[in-house]
Image (tube, grey):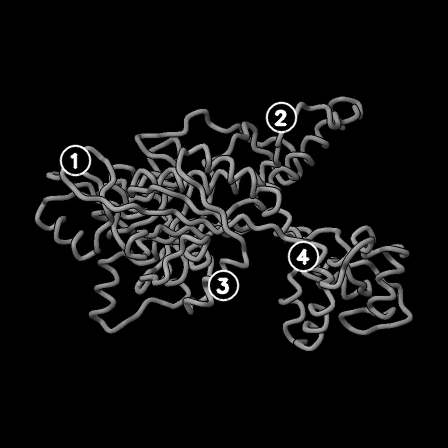
């Protein structure tokens, strides 16, 4: 993946090869400007005396993950690729939790006052916060990439899913108005569909309960395609475990259930609902916006022999896709939306009763929660060098989530022919550290980063 380059006035230049960036840094002609995505700033170069080439941002919107790629239009070279993991489900869960807490407080404090219902004013084109977060994530990264690269155009896959045809390819005419439960009640439909028996153990002639295949706590819905029948014993044993985990030792049963359960439509509905609002916001950037269909994206990918991923789909969006694409060695940057903290002023316990008030300050001694820091602890139990994210406290003792063994300890164990336990290698270690030992590497910006190797 190429390295973004800025001139001495922080204007974007053409991205360069990583080896060229290392050479410029070594000679002192450039300095590190940003870690994610990695960007250098030149000390002796101006955009007025440089040649830049047009680049295009290409976007493949998704419900859970959106692929973004930056392509140099003349050469077809992919200079950068991102996969943005959205937090729509997390926002939905938080809204439902808030609704439950408010309902409990209303019942306790206001003598069972009825809830206000649909009496808020909504602007034209209103979308739920969980959907708007997906649009904001893409809009944010388009704005950031424009500051790092000479972008002249944007391409978006403006896909529309026919949710009825996803369930039944033969649907036509009046059948669009006949839902899956046409002529049935839910329980009767499930009994006919699953053969009057428990889908997990096969028990018959026993009371059967309606069971969610994907638990509601894991994002499942009450849609009939997500419902099945189970005896009370199996229903309680499964709890809110994913069906893949519960039927791990029964692969045949798992295959049968998943074959009968239809494709969830929640993700398709999210993309359908957000596509035009995203297009409208991209138009506001002032750049020409090209749109492409899903079938054209698939055709471009197949004819060029490219493997399907989110970022490779983004590369193939629209008619502007070059005949020859240079993408060898590209390792997409995985970006996970984490938010910018919480607005909640009162922290409740799991029963909804207040237990603490949130502090008013967001920063302490120049740090905030989520900063990536380097710790150099000279002595004590945790002596060594660590790199990780911090969670601040309003006293000189922060929580540092770092790799389990300090560099010095690793070298010592390596000399002795020892290796850290595998379980400790995989997880981060949380330690208390004084801010005087910390140096900020990357300020928290609401996202978490990882490079796909």
Label 4: which secondary element = loop
Residue drawn at (72%, 60%), measured in percent from left and top? Answer: 167
Query: If you read the primary sequence from the N terminus, does the residue marked by circle 3 or circle 4 appear first?
Result: 4
Q: Quadrant of the C terminus?
A: bottom left
107 relative to 433, above or below = above
Q: Is residue 139 left or right of residue 6?
A: right
**Residue assigned mark 4:** 264
In this rendered view, identify the residue nearer to me: 336 or 44.
44
Asked if labels 4 and 3 touch by Cβ distance under 8 angstroms, the answer is: no
Residue 248 coordinates in the image, percent (x, y): 63, 72
Q: Which residue is mark 1?
A: 48
Gap between marks 3 and 4, in whole Å? 25 Å
Query: Label 2, label 4: how many angstroms apart (C-alpha)?
Result: 29 Å
Real-space CA distance between mark 2 and mark 1, rounded to the nearest whole angstrom: 44 Å
Viewer-proximal residue among 85 and 97? 85
Instruction: Give the CA distance from mark 1 to mark 3.
Output: 40 Å
**Residue sitting at x 12%, y 53%:** 23
Q: Where is 390 relative to 385, above or below?
A: above
Residues marked 1 and 3 touching at CB (< 8 Å): no
Q: CA distance from mark 4 to mark 1?
A: 53 Å
Q: Mark 4 vs mark 1: which is more N-terminal?
A: 1
Residue 426: x percent and y percent?
A: 40, 62
* SS under mark 3: helix
SS assignment at label 2: loop
Identify the residue under disc 3: 299
Mark drawn on residue 123: 2
- Residue 18 in percent (x, y) is at 21, 55
Q: Disc 2 or 4, which lies upstream in sequence?
A: 2
Left or right: residue 318 compared with residue 8: right
């Amino acid at each position: 993946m190429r390295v973004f380059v800025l001139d001495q006035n922080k204007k974007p230049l053409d991205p360069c090869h990583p080896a060229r960036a290392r050479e410029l840094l070594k000679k002192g002609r450039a300095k590190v400007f940003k870690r994610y995505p990695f960007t250098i700033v030149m000390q002796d170069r101006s955009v007025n005396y440089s040649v830049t080439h047009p680049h295009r941002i290409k976007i493949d919107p998704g419900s859970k993950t959106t692929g973004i790629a930056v392509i140099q239009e003349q050469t077809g070279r992919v200079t950068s690729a991102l996969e943005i993991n959205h937090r729509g489900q997390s926002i939905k869960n938080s809204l439902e939790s808030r609704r439950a807490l408010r309902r409990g407080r209303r019942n306790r404090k206001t003598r069972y006052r009825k809830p206000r219902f649909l009496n808020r004013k909504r602007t034209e084109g209103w979308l739920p916060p969980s959907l708007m977060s997906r649009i904001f994530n893409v809009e944010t990264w388009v704005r950031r990439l424009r500051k790092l690269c000479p972008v002249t155009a944007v391409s978006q896959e403006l896909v529309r899913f026919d949710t009825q045809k996803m369930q039944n390819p033969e649907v036509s005419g009046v059948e669009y108005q006949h839902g899956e439960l046409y002529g049935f009640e839910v329980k009767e439909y499930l009994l006919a569909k699953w053969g009057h028996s428990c889908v997990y153990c096969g028990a018959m002639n026993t009371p059967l309960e309606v069971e969610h295949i994907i638990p509601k706590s894991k994002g499942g819905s009450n849609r009939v395609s997500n419902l099945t029948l189970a005896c009370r014993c199996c229903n309680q044993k499964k709890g809110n475990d994913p069906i893949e985990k519960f039927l791990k030792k029964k692969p045949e049963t798992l295959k049968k259930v998943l074959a009968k359960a239809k494709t969830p439509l929640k993700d398709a509905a999210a993309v359908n609902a957000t596509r035009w609002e995203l297009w409208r916001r991209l138009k506001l950037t002032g750049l020409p916006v090209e749109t492409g269909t899903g079938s054209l994206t698939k055709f471009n990918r197949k004819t060029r022999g490219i493997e399907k991923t989110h970022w490779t789909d983004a590369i193939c969006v629209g008619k502007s896709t070059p005949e020859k694409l240079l993408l060898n060695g590209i390792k997409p940057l995985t970006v996970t939306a984490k938010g910018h903290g919480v607005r909640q002023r009162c922290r409740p316990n799991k029963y909804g009763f207040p237990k603490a008030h949130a502090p008013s300050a967001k920063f302490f001694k120049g740090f905030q929660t989520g900063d990536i820091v380097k710790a150099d602890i000279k002595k004590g139990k945790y002596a060594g060098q660590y790199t990780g994210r911090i969670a601040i406290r309003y006293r000189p003792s922060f929580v540092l989530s770092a790799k389990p063994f300090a560099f010095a300890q690793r070298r010592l164990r390596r000399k002795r022919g020892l290796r850290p336990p595998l379980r400790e290698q995989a997880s981060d270690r949380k330690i208390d550290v004084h801010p005087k030992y910390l140096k900020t590497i990357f300020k928290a910006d609401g996202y978490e980063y990882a490079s796909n190797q």
